Amino acid sequence: MKPSTPVKIYGLMAEFDTPSQLIAAARHVREAGFRRVEGYTPYPIEELGDTLHFGRSWLPLLVFLGGLFGGTAGFLLQYWVHVIHYPLNSGGKPLLSWPMFIPITFEMTILGAALTAVFSMLALNGLPMPYHPVFNVPRFTLASRDRFFLMIRRIDPLFDVERTRQMLVDLQATEVFEVPP
Amino acid sequence: MSDDHDHMEHAGEAQAAVEDRRAPVVEPGHTFGSVTDKISSIVLTRGVQRGWVLGFAIAFSLTMMLLYAITMTVVEGVGLWGINIPVGWGFAIVNFVWWIGIGHAGTLISAVLLLLHQEWRTSINRFAEAMTLFAVACAGIFPLLHLGRPWVFYWLFPYPNTMTIWPQFRSPLIWDVFAVSTYGTVSLLFWYVGLIPDLATLRDRTGNRLAKVVYGFMAMGWRGSAAHWKRYHTAYTLLAGLATPLVVSVHTVVGLDFASGIVPGWHSTIFPPYFVAGAIYSGFAMVMTLAIPMRWAYGLEDFITLRHLDNMAKIILATGMIVSYGYLMEAFFGWYSMNEYEQYVTLNRALGAYRYQYWWLVFCNAIAPQLLWFSRVRRTIPVLFVICIIVNTGMWLERYIIVVTSLHRDYLPSSWGMYAGTRWDWMIYAGTLGLFLTLMFLFIRLLPMISIFEMRELVAHKEGERAAADVE
């Protein structure tokens, strides 16, 4: 039963039947001092995210900046075209007829913010990522169906294969897997 | 026993009793596993069925007709169409506005109802978003062809060019380019972001090697980790918040295409709001038109329940009343303006050459939906389906009336004219319906038509509610 070379593993992964067991386990593990911990669930569970990752996200700020950039660029483009590069008297309106520039400024704000939201989310999540060790665990396919997983990485200073495994078993994990790198 | 009595008076209990009388948003007894398996099996194990092949074949034939008609239009020019002077904006603009409007319900369901925490949206948002995307694709075809020289469409975009000219940014037609292209892009992003966790589910469920690679590629290595979900949730909510004002702006800009012109019947401040209401109205009718056959064909009555149909019917009724109010106000302003041309247009709509279309429009949009006041009607699916078709027809007629009646009588009787679509117009219109359905059939076959992860969330939420009720 004992794995051949424990040094080479990526971490230990515990499987849970219910979200509440996973959340309880995650809390316990965090309180025990583990830091390189990650939970995997079939749907977003806010509590788990707050337990494991309590840092503030950069995402909202990035989206704001993206929107600001889009809107500014949209307005300046129109200003430059209609006032500087190709001034054209249209219906006797002033060259800087800014109310008429608002719709495009608005659309560009939305476009800038939306593109930033999606691509920053992907980038911060490290996606696309073609390979990840967690997929080496055959049962992990159930993480996208109805099972809940908690993984502790080997590089965590407190990690010890036997003791960590025992801790996870004690936390009501149905099974504990070694994750090959 | 006295405890029981206390409970009866509890406001929360009374609320729960009211809840119970309505149909549930998901039939009881479903688990994380069962919703996952049921929705993913439609794509993965059900295989190609005869009904699907038949429907796809019809839709695809219409698409081929579309390609033929477009080819002929490009070769021969827009002279093939019914447009003339004074009616330069025939079917192309009617269909453009109709399709764009249909798209709006998808964004409304996925974004606005998400922000309002309407959990019943969960089982209809995915295919409503797909509907949006395909409707925008169909809509985009029309103004492009209407340019007359569609191969130089890129002149609409501001780019440094050797002619050193720029688009006129003060024109609502250029606003349209920005609004619709932004709308198309954001709808695609929203749809795709929503799909990522479900693509991962399909990747993990399928036994087919090719499918695993393709879904895996599209899922981009999604693992469903807590960190992933946290950022995902933020990004998705922000997108919803961005899409909400966007969807209003798009049809506002479409309304401004008309309202900024000095054409009698168009030059009215009521256009933007009543266009937005009309868009939601026709869009929900289209969602129902698709949802009713789909839930029947794929046995999704557990997920798309009578509650959904009931709620959507109420939204159709409400927006239909706003649209009817718009018609009334249009007539009122026509009279109140004391402007001879405005008054003429108003009378001419009701009594002139296009009076039949006008009164059909009033019947379809203002009278027929009044049946939805009755809850019996809202629960009788065939009647609902017929009403939705009537609403879709009515909204098409509305745009026809707005475009054609205003243009066909110019200020000088010497420039009066008449308009009718030619067979090429009809072929392109029917063709886009075919294209829309073709894309819809492919979508149903290849991607989960109901958001699986959000259904799991809904199941978890319902379980939590039940557990809380048990504790009480």
Image: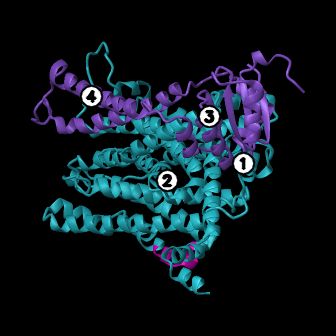
Chain colours: A purple, B cyan
Q: Residue at horizontal 85%, vertical 22%? A: A3
Q: Residue at horizontal 15%, vertical 26%? A: A88
Mark 4 or 3: in front is 3
* Quadrant showing the N terminus of chain B: bottom right
* Quadrant showing the C terminus of chain B: bottom right
Type of the residue with mark 1: Thr
Q: Against B373, is B399 above or below? A: above
Q: Against B378, is A62 above or below? A: above
Q: Residue at horizontal 66%, vertical 21%? A: A130
Q: Residue at horizontal 71%, vertical 27%? A: A134
Mark 1 or 4: in front is 1
Type of the residue with mark 3: Ala
Please tell me whether residue B374 belongs to the stretch shown in magenta. Answer: yes
Q: Is residue B146 visible?
A: yes
Q: Which mark is residue A72?
A: 4
Q: Does dot 3 land on a helix, a strand or a loop?
A: loop
Please tell me whether residue A9 belongs to the stretch shown in magenta. Answer: no
- Which residue lies under the disc numbered 1? B36
The disc, 4 or 3, on the residue closer to the chain's N-terminal end is 3
Type of the residue with mark 4: Thr
- Across and down, in percent, residue B234 comes to 47, 39
- Which residue lies under the disc numbered 2? B109
Crowding near the residue tagged with mark 4, few <14, some 14–19, many ≥20 C-alpha atoms within 10 Å: some
Asked if marks 3 and 2 touch (Cβ < 8 Å), the reply is: no
The disc, 1 or 2, on the residue closer to the chain's N-terminal end is 1
Query: Both on one chain, marks 4 and 3?
Result: yes
Crowding near the residue tagged with mark 1, few <14, some 14–19, many ≥20 C-alpha atoms within 10 Å: many
- Across and down, in percent, residue A150 comes to 68, 36
- Which residue lies under the disc numbered 3? A32
Q: Does dot 2 land on a helix, a strand or a loop?
A: helix
- Across and down, in percent, residue A71 comes to 29, 31
Residue extending farthest to the right is A1
